[in-house]
């Protein structure tokens, strides 16, 4: 078996690609990141990342300095210099339907296949509807001369924003779909450090690998919508959903994670993936999955509306011209991402109802301002709440969850707060004279 060091190209240097490129370089391989956007490449060459991801800029700089990592817009040169080509481009939701837009994945795969000059592996990492990989494989097989040994496989990625580096270096599992023994051997060499550290390897066919990815996200989304549905029952029955989640979570078959009730899920993955799965399952005639995923989506979107209504009923003055402070606007803590952010949605809805919304987020003010410039953005939590009639906690950053009710209480016009993430110590806030409201328990006082 050939043990010469593997050389890797990573096509697409967004969230997934930039992290994957840096992690593979960190594992000791030579990696070239490729993107069509020259500005992105120029920034990455300086170790600058256009999003907030703890540890990633440092990892990129370290591996550039070590000579293992470089970036280019020249796809042909990168492909000519590599043995494994990872496809890491986006699959956004199409504007016209819930189907995934596959034009970037198809374009990147076609470009790699056209540039191939020697044997190699094309490995898809992007999240795609089941059936895509086989089509891409057929396309590659038709393009590449039979004198070359080229294989297209699928190897989905499960990284979380905010923990991207950790998740990529120490994955829970490695899924390798469609690989021949030759290709599997190469990928096992590549992921050697993670496999030695205990990551299980699941080998399967192409459609299973594609579906593992979306099913994992669909299950997480289902857990969240499940607990939000139970939260509604808790409210009406006078029960407490957090205690309930703790108690059911001790059952190892259930597990406590992803059972935090509240404003629901957002971001670039969970909402898009369940909608793409709904669409694809519909095409395939798998109607149970369609119904289940639609329900999960509906419950989730309903949470935003419920928080808007709770804010209006909790607001001590008329919502028209009320001063509303929004604490947290990222779709979750530890990121500056506001794609499909439930928090930004709620802030926008209250703005449309005439509230004067002042937003503070530890990292996402700038990204939120780009997508919603008409809100006011405050440089600190204190600035955001000064003079507020109502405070909304919409993303559970530690800084926000740990805010001092006395300190903020002296700044606001009215001590009224909606904790849409159930992250505040409610009793301490009530003791400080605040009227608190939350979804998932009857503790509105
Ligand atoms: C998600 C998955 O967790 C990753 O495994 C996957 O690789 C990634 O999508 C992807 O497909 O690329 P991410 O979008 O970074 O990762 O976000 P999560 O940490 O999953 O959170 C998603 C949303 O669920 C957030 O809005 C969060 O606030 C919400 N959430 C999470 C809840 O409302 N309750 C919970 O208990 C947990």
Image: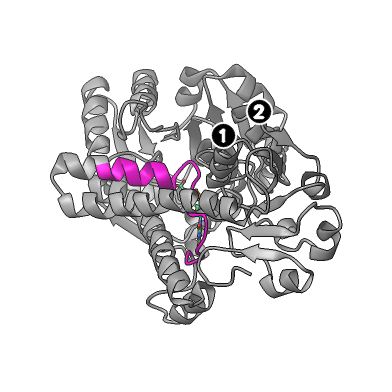
Which quarter of the picture shows residue 280? top left
User: Which label's residue is closer to the chain start, 2 or 1?
Assistant: 1
Residue 281, above or below 420: above
Q: 10 Å neighbourhood of mark 1: few (<14), some, or many (≥20)?
A: few
Instruction: Name the side, left or right, on which 245 lies relative to 1.
Output: right
Coordinates of residue 395 in the picture (x, y in percent): 62, 53
**Location of residue 19 with respect to 444 vertically, above or below:** above
Q: Specify the segment rendered in magenta.
A: 258-278
Q: Outermost residue toward the left? A: 285
Viewer-nearest residue: 267 or 15: 267
Magenta-colored stretch includes residue 275: yes
From mark 2 to mark 1, how far is it between C-alphas?
Answer: 10 Å
* Left or right of 318 in this view: 223: left
The residue sitting at 29% across, 27% down in the picture is 148
In this rendering, which labeled residue sits more in front, label 2 or label 1?
1
Q: Residue furthest front?
A: 318
Q: Which mark is residue 374?
A: 2
Q: Secondary structure at mark 1?
A: helix
Helix, strand or loop at mark 2:
loop
- Magenta highlight on residue 358: no
- Residue sitting at 43 percent across and 71 percent down? 236
Q: With respect to residue 35, does 181 lie above or below?
A: below
Residue nearest the viewer, comparing 226 with 432: 432
73 sits to left or right of 293: right
Is the CB of the residue bearing disc 2 within 8 angstroms of ligand 1? no
Residue 77 in the image, given as x and y percentages of width and height: 50, 19
Q: Is residue 175 visible?
A: no
Give the residue at x 70% y 61%.
Answer: 401
Residue 60 drawn at (x, y percent): 67, 39
Q: Which residue corresponds to mark 1? A: 352
Question: What percent of the width, then of the height, locates residue 223?
Answer: 40, 63
């Amino acid at each position: 078996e050939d043990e010469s060091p593997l050389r890797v190209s990573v096509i697409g240097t967004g969230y997934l690609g930039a992290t994957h490129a840096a992690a593979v370089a960190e594992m000791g391989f030579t990696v070239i990141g490729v993107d069509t956007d020259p500005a992105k490449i120029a920034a990455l060459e300086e170790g600058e990342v256009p999003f907030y991801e703890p540890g990633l800029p440092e990892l990129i700089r370290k591996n550039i300095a070590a000579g293992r990592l470089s970036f280019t817009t020249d796809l042909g040169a990168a492909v000519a210099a590599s043995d494994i080509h990872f496809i890491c481009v986006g699959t956004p939701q199409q504007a016209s339907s819930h189907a995934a837009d596959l034009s970037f994945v198809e374009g990147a795969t076609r470009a790699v296949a056209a540039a191939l000059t020697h044997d190699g592996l094309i490995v898809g990492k992007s999240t795609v509807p089941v059936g895509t990989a086989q089509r891409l494989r057929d396309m590659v097989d038709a393009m590449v001369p039979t004198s070359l040994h080229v294989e297209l496989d699928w190897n989905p990625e499960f990284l979380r924003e905010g923990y991207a580096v950790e998740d990529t270096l120490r994955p829970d599992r490695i899924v390798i779909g469609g690989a021949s023994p030759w290709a599997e051997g190469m990928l096992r060499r590549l992921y050697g450090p993670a496999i030695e550290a205990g990551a299980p390897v699941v080998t399967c066919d192409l459609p299973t690998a594609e579906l593992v990815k979306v099913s994992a996200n669909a299950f997480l989304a289902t857990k969240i919508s499940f607990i939000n549905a139970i939260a509604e029952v808790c409210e009406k029955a006078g029960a407490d959903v957090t205690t309930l989640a703790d108690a059911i979570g001790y059952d190892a078959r259930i597990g406590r994670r992803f059972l935090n009730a509240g404003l629901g899920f957002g971001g670039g993955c969970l909402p898009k993936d369940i909608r793409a799965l709904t669409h694809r399952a519909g095409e395939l005639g798998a109607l149970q999955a369609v119904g289940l995923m639609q329900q999960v989506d509906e419950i989730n979107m309903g949470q935003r509306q419920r928080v808007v209504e709770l804010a209006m009923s909790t607001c001590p003055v008329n919502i028209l011209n009320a001063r509303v402070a929004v604490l947290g606007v990222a779709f979750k803590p530890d990121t500056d991402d506001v794609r499909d952010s439930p928090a930004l949605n709620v802030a926008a809805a209250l703005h449309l109802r005439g509230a004067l919304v002042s937003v503070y987020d530890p990292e996402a003010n700038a990204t939120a301002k780009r997508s919603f410039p008409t809100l006011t953005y405050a440089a600190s939590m204190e600035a955001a709440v000064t003079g507020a009639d109502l405070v909304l906690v919409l993303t559970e950053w530690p800084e926000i969850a740990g805010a001092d009710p006395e300190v903020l209480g002296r700044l606001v016009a009215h001590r009224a707060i909606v904790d849409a993430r159930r992250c505040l110590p409610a009793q301490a806030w009530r003791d400080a004279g605040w009227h608190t409201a939350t979804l998932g328990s009857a503790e509105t006082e």
